[in-house]
């Protein structure tokens, strides 16, 4: 029973970390502050009318991965929008073209620490997302 409580607690913890990381990523992507640097992005990189999603890879991904790493998980495992490259590109293109809002969807593969429990349920994908209005 204690093992079950531990596993559930770890799942809740990574879920909350992913929600925080999604919030930080969406905040950086939506804010479009002047200045630049690793914590924010500047026009024209964040200009939704520019038709480019480079700002996401340059500013949002590092912020999200750093947040996850700072909270005790492997930030390099975080996937965005989908678990494959084609889904990532499709999601990124869709949300980059939206001039009114941004949405960051995170997926984190989590290995259950209890051996071969249930066979196919050894690895689960934990998801979190955050949407924000641009410019705010």
Image (cartoon, grey):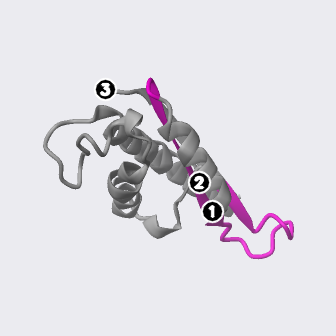
Image quadrant assignment for residue 110: bottom right
Contact (Cβ within 8 Å) of mark 3 with mark 1: no
Task: Judge left or right: residue 112 versus residue 91.
Answer: right
**Mark 2 or mark 3, whichever is nearer to me:** 2
- Location of mark 2 (residue): 89
Q: Is residue 89 above or below residue 41?
A: below
Q: Is residue 58 shown in magenta?
A: no
For image coordinates 29% across by 33% down, the residue present is 31
Dot 2: element? helix
If you read the primary sequence from the N terminus, does the residue marked by circle 3 or circle 1 appear first?
1
The x and y percentages for residue 53 are 43, 48
As drawn, the label of residue 85 is: 1
67 and 30: which is toward the camera: 30
Task: Judge left or right: residue 36 versus residue 65.
Answer: left
Tell me if residue 8 can be seen. Answer: no
C-alpha distance separating marks 2 and 3: 23 Å
For image coordinates 44% across by 65% down, the residue present is 75
């Amino acid at each position: 029973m204690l093992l079950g409580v531990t596993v559930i607690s770890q799942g809740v913890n990574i879920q909350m970390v992913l929600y925080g990381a999604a919030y930080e990523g969406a905040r950086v992507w939506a804010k479009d502050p002047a200045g630049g640097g690793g914590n924010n992005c500047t026009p024209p990189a964040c200009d939704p009318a520019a038709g480019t999603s480079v700002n996401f890879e340059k500013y949002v991904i590092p912020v999200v991965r750093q947040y996850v790493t700072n909270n005790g998980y492997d930030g390099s495992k975080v996937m965005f929008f989908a678990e494959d490259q084609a889904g990532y590109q499709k999601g990124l293109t869709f949300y980059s073209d939206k001039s009114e809002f941004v949405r960051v969807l995170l997926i984190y593969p989590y290995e259950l620490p209890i051996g071969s429990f249930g066979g196919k349920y050894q690895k689960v994908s934990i998801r979190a997302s955050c949407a924000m209005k641009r410019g705010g």
